[in-house]
Image (cartoon, coloured by chain):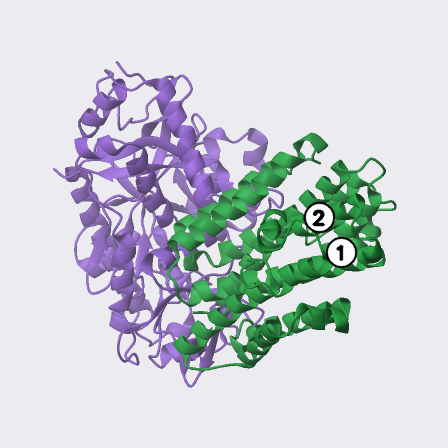
Chain colours: A green, B purple
């Protein structure tokens, strides 16, 4: 496969994953504002931080309002991580690697773009937001379904999956880091219903608020939430799960090509440490420091894959 | 009774006779059409548009930044050609394509046609499309034009003319394939009722044809790739489509490099050689070391690899000299010179404005003529005399006098019409036809092609960049 094609697939799936995560973050933010009586600007501050665009927002806007924040996250072209920017970039990459995709996967991606472009042509009214968010999730689901149902399990599949999980690991780590950081001073006061709303929003932004109850118990405990999102190998957005998938997809490439790269070592080491470290070890060392290091390793892995498989030169 | 609403006087309609009866090739279709509910057809028409949009069959219009992807309108009334009509056309096209290749081989070698005084020397040697780098070099298999799209127009029951020879990189074949696919999806019953010759094996034939012309330096199974200028090119969709349908790589210049005398592409496991390159990049941009040094689309050194017999480039560099509009006017002589027979298909009478006599005639008859730039394409920079305003004609006359050698003129042909679906029913619109031809050790003409249709009433300009649409084109077995 061409290096440029591998690069296109990797980014196509990173952007689609990012678009979906963006929608989920907005969803969690809306949910929080619905369950509160007072002003919710502070919540949107947290959402912007989780999306990694807090500073960028300030460059474009003077004040923080929920309406502007939602618009910025949803459709502002000045924000390269807005849902619409991601869908556009994902589709642009898909178009470039059209020959590597099945007709079903391409059409699902193209239709997603057509639908969202129409839906997000104008600033969304608050009443329309639930439908918009549902549509983004549904579109992303259709792309994923077409991809899983029709693509050959070959190198094309592997590079696409690697893109998905590098992005997802990054997003989960960021959400956890930012939220935790915001919430940390309140840890001692855990138990009040107000805090529960906050904690729940973390789970909601990774679509895990129901699953949590099945795995742990009804009470939202910070350590359990961190455990769920970091170490639980059954939770499809956890760091451990993402790295299992990255390692297995890199493994297929190594077997098919008969060569290993630096990326293989990095991914395997990260997975091993995700498996061996207990959540209390991590909390003792400091969750923020741990997540910061994870994000930077995850970025390094992305770079090593880019170099090892000749994405650019 | 099915009637065309509003008629273009004097034009030959391919579906409906003057007495409102259907022409023979359309009789089965016409019966089917008469039994259809108009609203259903209009709904189907929208459905077709959705299929195209969803599939991403789009093209870019230069100079429209905000609307960078457009659909070519598709009309669902097919253009139908009888087997007898097609055989005649196919023979004429084959003769013409054989002559084109012989002509190219000759002008890059002995130049006998010039020595015989049939074509002026300066017309070749002063032509930008003539590449001195090709002199004395014979491409693998002696084939210059691997893919040709001969533009044909019709003016009556038996009058066909060749309008252009498109021997560089003819585009549009993806529309031929997608139009058929769409028609079969929407109206399967029509393909039971009519015996329509298949076009869908084109990608297979193309790959086979390209592979059979692998260079001498190729050991083993030839590796074919399609070279595209990239995602922003107007025909990118087609490049991706063809690569996909053939099952070969779609590459850009930046993926390729000359290593150890071969053209190689950068893959995820290192550099791998390409044997046959179906390039959709113009000559000028192919090799910055040989042609335009500022080209970022090409591959430095590919011409050396080519001349050393280590890659096949399709179509060969320098084929543009054969479909140049100034050369076009000599095609009857060219066909006769190389095949020893009169051309089976007629040329449109052409005035070469470089000749003072002709220029004088053209200036005096601008209101009846179509004037084209010798090197232009896509319907840009041309004057359609009868529909132009007086002021437009006057302005064009000035350009003509300034650079007469840059123009040719032709009579305004009354192109045949085929009905299109409109809100009130059907209405006749002018069409042309581009069949696709593959050349290897044999000449294969795909039975069908791309019918372009001018959607505006009375318009003769069928180019997609100027508001033209397309139709599925049927060649019947009989």
> Label 2: chain?
A
Q: Is disc 2 surrounded by few (<14), some (14 to 19) or many (20+) residues within 10 Å?
A: many
Q: Nearer the viewer, residue B125 or B100?
A: B100
Q: Nearer the viewer, residue A164 or B397?
A: A164
Q: Quadrant of the N terminus of chain A?
A: bottom left
Q: Residue drawn at (47%, 68%), measured in percent from left and top? A: B286
Q: Nearer the viewer, residue A135 or B120?
A: A135
Above/below status of B137 relative to A76? below
Decide if residue B379 is on the left or right side of residue A152.
right
Decide if residue A210 is on the left or right side of residue A180.
left
Q: CA distance from mark 2 to mark 1?
A: 9 Å
Find residue A286 and report its horizontal and vertical position in percent.
77, 70
Q: Nearer the viewer, residue A310 or B475?
A: A310
Above/below status of B200 relative to B53? below
Decide if residue A228 is on the left or right side of residue B138.
right
Q: Residue furthest bottom?
A: B260
Whichever of labels 2 and 1 marks the residue nearer the N terminus, that label is: 1
Q: Secondary structure at mark 1?
A: helix
Find residue B359 and report its horizontal and vertical position in percent.
46, 45
Q: Secondary structure at mark 2?
A: helix
Quarter assignment of residue A28: top right
Find residue B240 and report its horizontal and vertical position in percent.
42, 56
Task: Give a yes or no on whether discs 2 and 1 share a subunit.
Answer: yes
Q: Which mark is residue B423?
A: none
Question: Which residue is identified by label 1?
Answer: A179
> Label 1: chain?
A
Question: Which residue is identified by label 2?
Answer: A201
Quarter assignment of residue B424: top left
Q: Are marks 2 and 1 in contact (CB under 8 Å)?
A: yes
For the question of whether residue B384 can be seen, the reply is: yes
For the question of whether residue B382 can be seen, the reply is: no
């Amino acid at each position: 496969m061409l290096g440029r094609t591998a690069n296109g697939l990797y980014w196509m799936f990173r952007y689609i994953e990012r678009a979906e995560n963006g929608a989920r973050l907005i969803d969690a933010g809306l949910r929080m504002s619905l369950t509160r009586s007072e002003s919710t600007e502070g919540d949107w501050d947290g959402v912007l931080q989780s999306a990694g665009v807090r500073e960028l927002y300030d460059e474009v806007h003077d004040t923080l309002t929920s309406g502007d924040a939602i618009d910025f996250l949803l459709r502002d072209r000045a924000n390269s991580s807005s849902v619409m920017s991601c869908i556009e970039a994902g589709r642009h990459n898909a178009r470039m690697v059209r020959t590597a995709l099945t007709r079903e996967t391409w059409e699902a991606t193209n239709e997603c773009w057509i639908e969202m472009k129409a839906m997000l042509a104008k600033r969304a009214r608050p009443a329309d937001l639930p439908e918009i968010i549902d549509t983004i999730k549904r579109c992303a689901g259709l792309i994923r379904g077409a991809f899983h149902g029709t693509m050959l399990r070959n190198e094309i599949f592997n590079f696409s999956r690697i893109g998905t999980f590098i992005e997802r690991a990054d997003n989960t780590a960021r959400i956890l880091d930012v939220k935790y950081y915001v919430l940390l001073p309140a840890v001692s006061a855990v138990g009040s219903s107000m805090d529960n709303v906050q904690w729940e929003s973390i789970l909601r932004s990774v679509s895990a608020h129901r699953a949590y109850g099945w795995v742990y118990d009804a009470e939202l405990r910070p350590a359990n939430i961190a455990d769920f999102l970091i170490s639980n190998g059954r939770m499809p957005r956890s760091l451990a799960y993402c790295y299992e998938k990255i390692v297995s997809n890199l493994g297929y490439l190594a077997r098919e090509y008969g060569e290993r790269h630096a990326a293989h070592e990095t991914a395997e080491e990260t997975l091993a440490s995700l498996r061996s470290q207990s959540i209390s070890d991590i909390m003792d060392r400091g969750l923020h420091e741990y997540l910061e290091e994870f994000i930077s390793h995850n970025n390094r892995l992305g770079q090593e894959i880019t170099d090892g498989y000749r994405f650019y030169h | 009774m099915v009637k065309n609403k509003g008629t273009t006087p004097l034009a030959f309609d391919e579906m409906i006779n003057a007495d409102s009866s259907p022409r023979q090739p359309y009789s089965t279709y016409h019966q089917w059409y008469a039994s259809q509910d108009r609203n259903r057809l209009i709904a189907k028409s929208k459905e077709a548009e959705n299929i195209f949009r969803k599939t991403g069959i789009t093209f870019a219009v230069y100079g429209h930044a905000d609307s960078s992807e457009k659909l070519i309108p598709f009309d669902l009334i097919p253009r139908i050609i009888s087997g007898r009509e097609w055989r005649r056309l196919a023979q004429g096209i084959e003769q013409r394509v054989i002559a084109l290749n012989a002509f190219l081989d000759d002008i890059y070698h002995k130049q006998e046609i010039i020595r015989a005084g049939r074509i002026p020397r300066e017309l070749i040697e002063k032509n930008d499309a003539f590449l001195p780098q090709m002199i004395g070099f014979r491409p693998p298999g002696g084939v210059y034009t691997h893919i040709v799209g001969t533009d044909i127009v019709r003016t009556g029951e038996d009058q066909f003319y060749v309008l252009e020879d498109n021997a560089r990189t003819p585009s549009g074949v993806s529309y031929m394939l997608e139009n058929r696919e769409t028609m079969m999806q929407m109206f399967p019953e029509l393909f039971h009722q009519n015996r329509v010759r298949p076009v869908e094996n084109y990608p297979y034939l193309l790959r086979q044809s390209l592979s059979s012309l692998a260079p001498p330096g190729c050991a083993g199974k030839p590796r074919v790739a399609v070279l595209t200028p990239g995602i922003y090119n107007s025909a990118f969709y087609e490049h991706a489509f063809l690569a996909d349908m053939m099952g070969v790589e779609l590459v850009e210049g930046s993926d390729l490099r000359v290593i150890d005398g071969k053209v190689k592409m950068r893959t995820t496991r290192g550099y791998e050689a390409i044997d046959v390159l179906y390039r959709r990049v113009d000559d000028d941009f192919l090799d910055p070391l040989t042609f335009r040094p500022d080209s970022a689309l090409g591959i430095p050194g590919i011409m050396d690899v080519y001349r050393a017999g280590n890659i096949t480039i399709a179509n060969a560099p320098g084929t543009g000299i054969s479909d140049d509009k100034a050369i076009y006017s000599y095609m009857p002589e060219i066909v006769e010179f190389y095949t020893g027979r009169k051309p089976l298909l007629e040329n449109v009478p052409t005035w070469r404005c470089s000749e003072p006599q002709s220029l004088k005639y053209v200036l005096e008859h601008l209101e009846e003529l179509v004037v084209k730039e010798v090197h232009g394409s896509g319907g840009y920079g041309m004057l359609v005399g009868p529909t132009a305003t007086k002021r437009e004609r006057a302005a064009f006359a000035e350009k003509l006098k300034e650079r007469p050698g840059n123009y040719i003129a032709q009579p305004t042909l009354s192109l045949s019409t085929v009905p299109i679906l409109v809100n009130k029913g059907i209405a006749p619109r002018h069409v042309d036809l581009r069949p696709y031809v593959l050349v290897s050790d044999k000449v294969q003409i795909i039975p069908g092609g791309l019918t372009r249709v001018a959607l505006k009433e009375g318009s003769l300009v069928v180019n997609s960049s100027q508001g033209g649409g397309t139709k599925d084109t049927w060649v019947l077995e009989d």
